[in-house]
Image: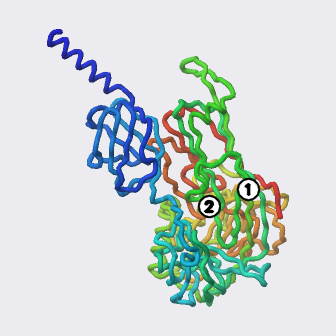
Amino acid sequence: MSFIGVLLFLIAVISATKLKVPQITVIDPKVANPGDVLLIYGSGFGNEQHESFVEIGGLRITSSNCIEWSDNKIAITLPANVRDGLVYVVTQGGRSEPKIFTNKTAVPVKVISDPATSFPAIYNIEEKNQSVGGLLSIHGKNFGLMRNNSKVYFSFKDSESVQSVIQIYCENEDYEYWSDELIRVRVPDGASDGSIFVETEKGTSNNYPFILQSSIGKKTLLEKRTFVIDTSVELREVVADDDGLIFLRIPKPPVFASQPNVEVTLSSREPFIEEIAGTIVHQFDGEDIKVAIESEKTDSKTETFLPTANLNINHTFVVTTHAVSTDIKEHLVKPYSQGVLLSKMQQSSDSIYSLSKDEKIISLARSIIGKTTNPYTKAYLIYKYMVNNFAVLSELRSPDAPILDLIKTKRGDAYDFAMLYNGLLAACNVIVRPCAGILIDADSSAKSHWWCEFYVESFGWVPVDVALGAGLPFECFIKRTNIKDFYFGNLDAQHVTFSRDFNRLRPTVAYSKIVCQPKTYALQSIWEESSEKVKRYSSFWTTPNITGVY
């Protein structure tokens, strides 16, 4: 063979190698710690790394972590910031099909130990008398080096359980520090005099007495309701390649003082992740889509028949709610301390607070509140202005209708009212967050609804429903005499909460297509997520349906 012939042969071999799509057959181990070596076996990786790379959970692994790279084997050292997720090998030939990797540090490990010596125990609590939001230091042993799913419980009493004390646990935002012998946690909203205890996977600690300071006012949980709620999602005419992936993020109602019990009693399909960041995650892969194929549709571009699938997900929630009543001594409310202001502002969503930076919002807020510095007074003055000057529409406007139209036209829907109230309070430095969920009428019909909560230091969150205060048609189980006054600082038991503030979620798959459902019963950034190999589908989310009231 001549020199030119040899050269052409080598060029053809190299070109063929570059065009070969990588394939992963197995990763070993599937569960590992940062710093461990991960082996990836397959084909089409290329004999040298060059511009190729490994991606894990959306994180591109740098070449400095690569120990070995050959056409059928890759060895990498897992970096400290590696996350759970899908593993890909990406070369000039394309992107491989994924394999699932789990970070071992996120997996609870069962350790056999003597329960008598491993149960958590509380020895002492600093600052035994604290108000809501105050910091407690809990000293003891066997709390665990990391919190994981462990919780601190406080007592709370409602008007229907005077003889018994119910426990509520702290939300994630309340925890400041956790170690095996010390926990620092803020007193949660809704706590009362009584006791606290620590619950870990090893067991429950002793009860330790706690006294709540409540000089500013009192929050009371009144009548209780339990609702059976059905939710459903339908995906229609799904067309995808064998390695296509679709993820659904189903909103799950949160647990807090006035919504103390949430149970998932039925799921039509086993979740991919039972709960993460306030959502239930369902995954559909190529095999799931193949099984669900019902018909063929003609592709308008190629005029070929494509198999299409229809997929359904249903959940049933049982949710207990309480009516909330607050009695606040307005003259005792002080401006926020710097620490509280910074802490709460950092926890709030940027997308919600962006409205408060609009010049029209700032100008209107200043004209309403005047020179007052009292957060409670500011919230009340803005509430009274809105219910007296704006008309609420019973029908929802389009999802892309500007919220600022409410200022111009003096008319808007419940979403507009809640978001404008949120923006006006934020513009005058009142800590506030929007809430979303469903409003259940006396005939058990439900509709998406939005309201707000603002924060009073040393007291907690105060509910406000501006749309109902402005006269949104609604029939309550218990007749109210003065609607305008009631819905500032009080809330009925017919509000079921799905979101408290905007829930900004992270994508599950890199380079995925994200779908959001605007102006609906939850505030979250991702509802649907599909990989590049999903060609098309349509989705239909129903408003939650009430099937039982107790």
Q: Horizontal placement of 477 versus 336: left or right?
A: right
Q: CA distance from mark 2 to mark 1?
A: 20 Å
Q: Residue 448 is drawn in which quadrant?
A: bottom right
User: Does the rendering let one see residue 223?
Assistant: yes
Query: Split into 4 quadrants, where in the image is the C terminus?
Result: bottom right
**Percent position (x, y) of residue 544?**
73, 52
Looking at the rendered structure, the secondary structure element under dot 1 is: strand
Residue in view at x 79 percent, y 78 percent: 160
- Horizontal side of 445 relative to 313 (left or right) equals right
Residue 168 in percent (x, y) is at: 65, 74
- Where residue 80 appears, as percent x and y from the top left, is 36, 57
Q: Is residue 170 visible?
A: no
**Which one is nearer the viewer's eye here, 197 or 314?**
197
Crowding at dot 2, Cα within 10 Å, few <14 / some 14-19 / many 20+, comes out as many
What residue is disc 1 on?
Answer: 265
**Image x and y of residue 320, in percent:** 74, 66
Q: Quadrant where the N terminus lies?
A: top left
**Furthest residue to the top?**
1
Q: Is residue 363 above or below residue 544?
A: below
State yes or no: discs 2 and 1 in contact (Cβ < 8 Å).
no
At label 1, the amino acid type is: Thr
Q: Residue at x 61, y 83 (%)?
A: 206
Residue with the mark numbered 2: 499
| Above/below status of 370 relative to 25 | below
Q: Amino acid at mark 2?
A: Ser
Instruction: Rate crowding at label 1 as few (under 14), some (14 to 19) or many (20 or more) other CA atoms within 10 Å.
Output: few
Q: Of the residues tagged 2 and 1, which is closer to the observer?
A: 1
- Element type where label 2 sits in the image: strand
Q: Quadrant of residue 419?
A: bottom right
Tell me which residue sits at (51%, 61%) in the image: 109
Left/right of residue 86 with respect to residue 320 in the rendered view: left
Residue drawn at x 54%, y 20% is 301
